[in-house]
Structures are given as C-alpha cells and as structure tokens.
Image (spheres, helix red, strand yellow):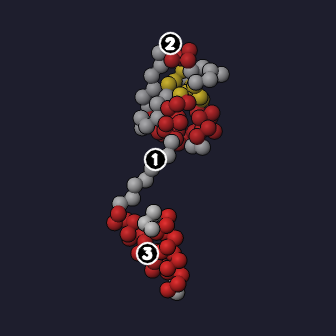
Amino acid sequence: MTLTTTPLEAAQHTPGVAHGLSLPEASERSGYGVSTLRRHIKDGRLKAVKAKGRIFVEMSDLDAFAEPEPVQPSEASLQEWARRMAAKAPAIRPEQRQIILAAFSSALGEN
C-alpha cells in the first residue's frame, strides 16, 4: 500500500477536520465497503494518507473516484442488442409499427 504522510498531511487529516474522511466515513459517503476502498487505495486508484495509524481520504478524491464514467457502447454491440430484443419481442401490427417509428423519429428530431 503506497500511503505517504508528512507532518502537514498528518495535521490536515486528523479526525474532525472537514476535508479528510476516515475510511468508515468515506465508505458511508461513497456506498463502497471499507475493504473495497482499501483495495482501491492499495491498487493506486484512490489517493489516501495515513496519519496516526489511520487512513484518510480527501473528499474531492473520493468524489472523483466514485463519479460514474459514461459507457460508450460500440455501434456493433448496439445493433446486436437491438437484434436480440427484436427477436424476443411479440409480433406487432402495422399500425403499431407506424406509431413506434413516429415516436422514435420525433424523439430523434427526424421529422
């Protein structure tokens, strides 16, 4: 585990200081378990400092770590998903098809 502590960091990361969270506090804030946070700290994906035998995480580092990353599926995977969903869907009447196509065209701005 690569945790570094300088006297300044130790002073800044003592319990009760607003910008440093203990692991239980970070766990509660992020929804990740303490052991999961420890693993991400050990792997270098989450920055932390160790002071007086305890590990602390900056709130901004925790927020950046826990922020969701957008998923960009490929065109091929979207087409494959659409084929699977279409194969499972019940048959529709022609007028239902027109309603669905019109709704998607309108939502996509293709009028």
Name the element at disc 2: helix
Give the amino acid at mark 3.
Arg
Q: Give how far across and how far down residue 77 sits, in percent.
A: 37, 65
Residue under pointer 3? 84
**In the image, which disc is placed on residue 69?**
1
From mark 2 to mark 1, how far is it between C-alphas? Answer: 35 Å
Q: Give how far across and how far down residue 53 sits, in percent.
A: 56, 23
Give the amino acid at mark 2.
Pro
Discs 2, 3 touching: Cβ within 8 Å: no
User: Alpha-carbon neighbours of circle 2 within 10 Å: few (<14), some, or many (≥20)?
Assistant: few
Whether residue 91 can be seen here: no
**In the image, which disc is placed on residue 7?**
2
- Considering every residue shown, the one lying at the far top of the view is 7
Q: Give how far across and how far down residue 75 sits, in percent.
A: 35, 63
- Figure quadrant of the N terminus: top left
- Figure quadrant of the C terminus: bottom left
Give the amino acid at mark 1.
Glu
Q: Please say if 88 is above or below 2.
A: below
Name the element at disc 1: loop
